[in-house]
């Protein structure tokens, strides 16, 4: 899960990525919650493993910006600029995190791909431990395979991150997915929207299939929401339509609101696009938690659950 541990670059600040490699003369390198050995380890990297991230100002620590370890930190003392002769078969033999969502779950699948059936669930904030499959995002656990995008790695309380994730640790969605309308607070067709990186990868696959069926992309109103924006929507709609600020899955970059209109249309309950999304959501790692109740105003809301 995309996160922002202590010492991270402030929201919106430019950050230059660099790619380095774990030094070959150590046993393993701890990946930690934050930029100090006082932070707990949440993973191990093998010698020669590639690490892409941003250097933290005034500290010899690299904050990871790609894959399930995004947001966690590794010490620069054990990194080198020299690539190994061959990529190690197991770049990360251990990884540990918690299910990010405050009110849903992370799917467990029988294999490391959305094509494999769902065999169980890890519940919200539940501890998950396993090893990366190749470079991720899938993690093999004792119960099956979990998409690393559903996990937060560097805090036992994922709620503290809600709405406070720097944009450079999220992924911008293509503008061609955006709805064309204008609405508060300041959204237009060219307003950037952001998602957790693994959720965006899954969205690309969903969009490709949707376009094959309907001839156009599934247009999107909202994705990641800062804490301040969550306050705006809560004051506008209140509960249950808007989540209490600091509890929305939008605050983790794990939720999508497809385009809403004042009159029923293709994403409304029972309409053709909504029926397609509900029929295919699990195939792409998404879930609409309100489908069984047909809650007003939530026909367009889908969470990434892996």
Image (cartoon, rainbow, N blue to C red):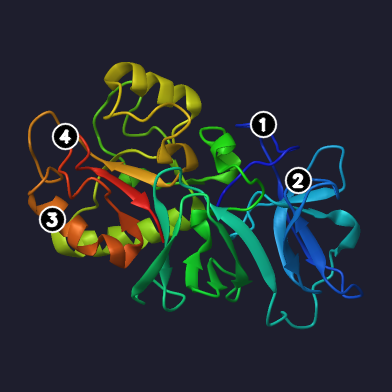
Q: Is residue 5 left or right of residue 99?
A: right
Determine which residue is flagged by label 4: 296
Label 3 vs label 4, nearer the camera: 4
Element carrying mark 4: loop
Give the image location of residue 257, x and y in percent.
29, 41
Residue at x 30% of width, y 60% of height: 206
Sequence-earlier tag: 1 or 3: 1
Q: In which quarter of the image is residue 268?
A: top left
Q: In this view, does 96 lie to the left or right of 304?
A: right
Q: Which mark is residue 275?
A: 3
In the image, residue 306 above or below residue 99: below
Give the image location of residue 135, x and y in percent.
61, 71
Determine which residue is flagged by label 1: 10
Specify few, some or many for label 1: CA neighbours under 10 Å numbering under 14, 14-19, or 20 or more: some
Residue at x 82% of width, y 71% of height: 28
Give the image location of residue 248, x and y in percent.
41, 36
How far apart are the alpha carbons under marks 1 and 2?
15 Å
């Amino acid at each position: 899960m995309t996160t922002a541990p202590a010492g991270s670059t402030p929201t919106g600040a430019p950050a230059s990525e660099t790619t380095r490699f774990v030094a070959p003369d150590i046993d393993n390198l701890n990946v930690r919650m934050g930029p100090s050995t006082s932070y707990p380890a949440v993973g191990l990297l093998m010698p020669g493993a590639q690490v892409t991230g941003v250097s933290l100002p005034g500290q010899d620590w690299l904050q990871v910006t790609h894959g399930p370890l995004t947001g966690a930190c590794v010490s620069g003392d054990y990194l080198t600029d020299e690539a190994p002769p061959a990529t190690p078969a197991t770049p990360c033999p251990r990884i540990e995190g918690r299910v990010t969502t405050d009110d849903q779950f992370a799917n467990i699948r029988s294999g490391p791909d959305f094509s494999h059936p769902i065999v169980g669930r890890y519940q919200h904030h539940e501890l998950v431990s396993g090893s990366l499959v190749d470079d991720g995002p899938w993690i093999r656990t004792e119960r099956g395979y979990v998409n690393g995008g559903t996990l937060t790695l560097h805090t036992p309380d994922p709620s503290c991150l809600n709405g406070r994730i720097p944009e450079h640790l999220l992924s911008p969605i293509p503008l061609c997915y955006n709805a064309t309308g204008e609405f508060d607070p300041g959204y237009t067709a060219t307003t950037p929207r952001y998602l957790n990186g693994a959720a965006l990868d899954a969205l690309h696959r969903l969009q490709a299939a949707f376009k094959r069926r309907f001839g156009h992309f599934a247009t999107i109103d909202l994705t990641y929401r800062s804490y301040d924006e969550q306050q705006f929507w809560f004051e506008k709609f209140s509960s249950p339509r808007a989540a209490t600020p600091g509890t929305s899955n939008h605050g983790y970059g794990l939720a999508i609101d497809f385009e809403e209109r004042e009159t029923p249309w293709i994403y409304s309950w029972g309409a053709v696009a909504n029926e397609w999304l509900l029929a295919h959501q699990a195939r792409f790692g998404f879930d609409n938690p309100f489908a069984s109740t047909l809650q007003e105003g939530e026909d367009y809301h889908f969470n990434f659950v892996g």
